Amino acid sequence: MLEVANLSKKYGKTLAVDDVGFTVPDGRVGILLGPNGAGKSTVIKSIAGLLRYKGSIRIQGIDSRETEAKKCFAYVPEIPNMYEALTVREHIEFITRAYGTEVSEEEIGQLLEKFELDDKQDKLGNELSKGMMQKVSICCALIIKPRVILLDEPMVGLDPAAIKELKTVILELRDSGCTVLISTHMLEMVKELWDVTFVMDKGHILGTYVKEDLANEDLEELFFKVTGQAEKNERGEHSQEIIPDHSGNADSTEDGR
């Protein structure tokens, strides 16, 4: 289970996330949706332990800052980072050692084959394409057999075969009791995956929606209705998120979420 309560984050004097709270139970797939500037990236980075924040984040009932919580948590960032001097296989082996996870050579081989990396396992990190780096990042997250997994725009950069495989893996994780949270703007990619959706805008959760309660309502229509994005687009408005620059001052960008 992933529990976020009273989460707030300021960049300078700018309040990017204001008293956000939501829960994704075991064996469920949660989707965090929001337009540019909604504050999704701030929430994701807070959960992943990359930002200081006010509030509470608990993983399987344990404070997310505790080592025991980190051991059962996996994170797939939107932009993967590879060690240039490690091969694909060495990345996975490094993660298993860091987490102290018992994994057989057969399990590693099966995972590499599943994401069509078995013939690329000797390639170095600086030899990989964006898509291959994304696959390696996903493999590194899966190999620790997490109980809670966070995926930030996981479909970006993947080829159709990898997207199909990742969807299958996400459903398998859910069915095994794993908690899954996906942050994305690619609504078509998650429409058959989600169990609960959190719609966010301007630093707030505007609504929580359970799939069973919405009958056949389309996720995209729900998103536009709740955020009012259709009206904004007609008026030519665009939202932005305030993020910190390297000097510690607040700055804005259309790429922020």
Image (cartoon, rainbow, N blue to C red):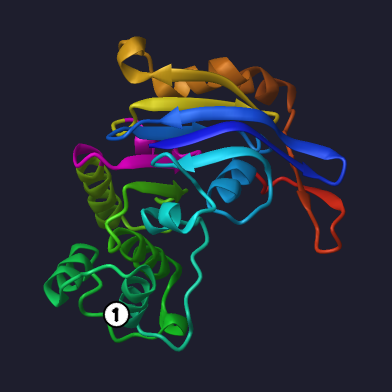
Q: Position of residue 212 (x, y in %)?
A: 30, 15
Quadrant in the picture for the C terminus: top right
The residue at the point 53 percent across, 52 percent down is 48
Image check: 195 left or right of 201? left
Residue kind at label 1, given as amino acid type? Arg
Q: Quick check: is 182 in the magenta stretch?
A: yes
Occupied quadrant, residue 242: top right
Q: Position of residue 62 (x, y in %)?
A: 45, 44
Image check: 218 left or right of 178? right
The furthest residue to the left = 106
The residue at the point 40 percent across, 50 percent down is 155
Which residues, given as a range, are shown in magenta?
174-191
Q: Position of residue 224 (x, y in %)?
A: 55, 21
Read off the residue under disc 1. Answer: 89
Q: How many marks?
A: 1
Give the secondary structure at mark 1: helix
Quadrant in the picture for the N terminus: top left
